[in-house]
Amino acid sequence: MMKMSGKQVLWVLLALLGVATISLLILSCANTGRHASSHSLLVAEGSRAAQVQGGGSGIGESAVSMDPFYHTMYCVAASRYGEVRGRLPESPEDVKPYLFVQPRLKLDKWQMDEDQLAIAATLRESGGSTRAAEVTLYRRGTAAWDKFMEGGKRLMLSSLREFREKGLQPDYTEEDIMQGRWSNYIWDNRRAHSRDAADYEQLIWSLDLAKVLGWGALHFKSANGRFPANPQELIDFLGPVNEEAWIAPATGKAVWFVAEYDGENVSYTPSPDLKHFELIVPLFGAGAEKRGLPRGPQWGADNGYYPGLYFRYTDEMMLVYP
């Protein structure tokens, strides 16, 4: 039977599991029903607020509905809040510093119940249909969290069996999964690529920003048939900027877009024909080169990770939000 490296496991996971794996990794934030889960290129500070007031593509009748994406933004922001602060946010206002843009979505419910949070909304789909979506997030370390993670382990075990049925032999066992020594859970993956709590906070900040912008560019293309011509067009499409969210945890300084990557700001570069793009978000030194514990899929250049330097995404890569 074929032995698989950690890198091979990552790509086979994505290829074989598809939506099922992503549902586990995102705490079911991009859910399909009810699921359980835990400027132009001006950089001057004084110009930013004025920039985001302008026109741009926006979201019209011809655009692909962004409601599911916005719902995911709320869920990811609430999860990142919990990872950083050790408690769940009590109101949508609490997560504003964790939302890079203000989602154009009215929430139906934001309900705290002991150590869990339910977020619900009525989502518009492309074509005009609607559906109810509700996600429950659990605080790490609680009994509810442990129960949720048991469900995640069962999905990992199912994946392992599927690998073996295809003649593959990953370098981890059922016991590794059940004992927590191997995990493909999204927050375990991020923690395992961090050196300490401060490193972790910067890593997940940079990754979240990169995913919001990269996935937003893909939504823009679905709605307009091309990628954004400049950062302003992308921001206008996504929504009003929450400026406090753009302050990097490691430096305490705000970042914005630059025409050429400088190690301290974000660069978004479309091709002349607007059929491709490159996006780079700095890491400010965060991120370990080799994954620590628990073992699991290893990040690397193939999935946009350059430890200590930046996340780099292009339209030709497999982009998954979060």
Image (tube, helix red, strand yellow):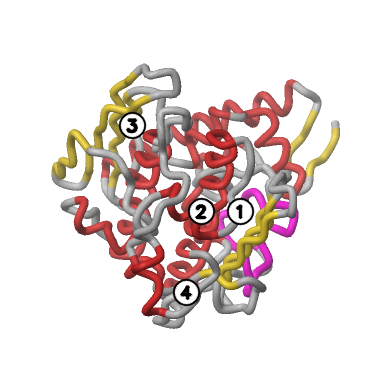
Judged from the image, the secondary structure of the residue bearing numbered disc 3 is strand
Residue 55: horizontal and vertical position, in percent?
41, 52
Q: Which residue is mark 1?
A: 229
| Marks 1 and 3 in Cβ contact (< 8 Å) | no
Mark carried by residue 131? none
Would you call the spot at circle 1 few (<14 residues within 10 Å), some (14-19), or many (20 or more)? some
Q: Which residue is mark 4?
A: 255
| Marks 2 and 4 in Cβ contact (< 8 Å) | no
Residue 171: horizontal and vertical position, in percent?
73, 44
Judged from the image, the secondary structure of the residue bearing numbered disc 4 is loop
Q: Which residue is mark 3?
A: 36
- Spatial CA distance of label 4 from label 3 is 34 Å
Residue at 49% x, 76% y is 43
Residue at 42% x, 44% y is 58
* Type of amino acid at the residue the image marks with label 1: Ala
Q: Is residue 144 left or right of residue 39?
A: left
